[in-house]
């Protein structure tokens, strides 16, 4: 099976979806950053499939829907952090 297929292999591991990357995806939690209504929002503890070689992150449709619901709730952030601009 080609490495770019992103399909499950016979042993259950999912290959990275980046063409030419030999890595396999592992279930992890990540920090997800998104721009929403002019603000930058950082969400910790997001479940994702992450490539063991290149670090490519895949979010399931269910996770994306959950993130969208969180963003629409418009709750106050638990913490704030400085934002640096590349100059």
Image: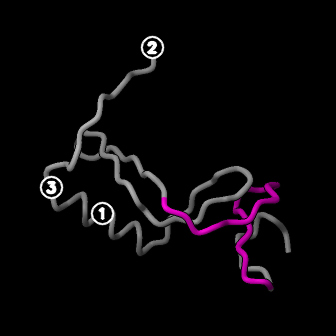
Identify the residue position indicated by label 1 in the image: 68
Q: Decide: marks 1, 3 in contact (CB < 8 A)? A: no
Is residue 69 inside the magenta stretch? no
Numbered circle sitting on residue 87? 2
**Of the numbered discs in the image, which one, if any, rests on residue 24?**
none
Q: Nearer the viewer, residue 44 or 21?
A: 44
Q: Is residue 66 above or below residue 74?
A: below
Residue depicted at 45% across the width and 20% down the height: 86
Left/right of residue 49 with respect to residue 44 in the rendered view: right
Instruction: Name the side, left or right, on which 17 lies relative to 61.
Output: right
First of labels 1, 3 by sequence position: 1
Q: CA distance from mark 1 to mark 3?
A: 11 Å
Look at the image and tell me in which quarter the N terminus lies.
Answer: bottom right
Q: Quadrant of residue 24?
A: bottom right
Residue 8, compared with residue 5, is above or below; it is below
Q: Residues within 10 Å of mark 1 (few under 14, many from 20)?
A: few
Q: Name the residue beneath numbered marker 3.
A: 74
- Disc 1 from disc 2: Cα separation: 31 Å
Relative placement, left or right, of 25 versus 45 is right
**Image coordinates for residue 46, horizontal then vertical, percent:** 42, 62
User: How far apart, in angstroms, are the residues tagged by discs 3 and 2?
Assistant: 30 Å
Closer to the N terminus: mark 1 or mark 2?
1
């Amino acid at each position: 099976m080609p490495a770019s297929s992103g399909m499950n292999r016979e042993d259950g591991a999912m290959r990275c979806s980046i063409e030419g990357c030999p890595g396999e995806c592992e279930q992890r939690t990540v920090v997800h950053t998104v721009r929403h209504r002019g603000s930058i929002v950082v969400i910790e503890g997001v479940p994702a499939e992450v490539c063991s070689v290149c670090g490519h992150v895949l979010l399931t449709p269910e996770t994306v829907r959950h993130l969208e619901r969180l963003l629409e709730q418009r709750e106050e952030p638990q913490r704030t952090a400085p934002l640096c601009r590349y100059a």
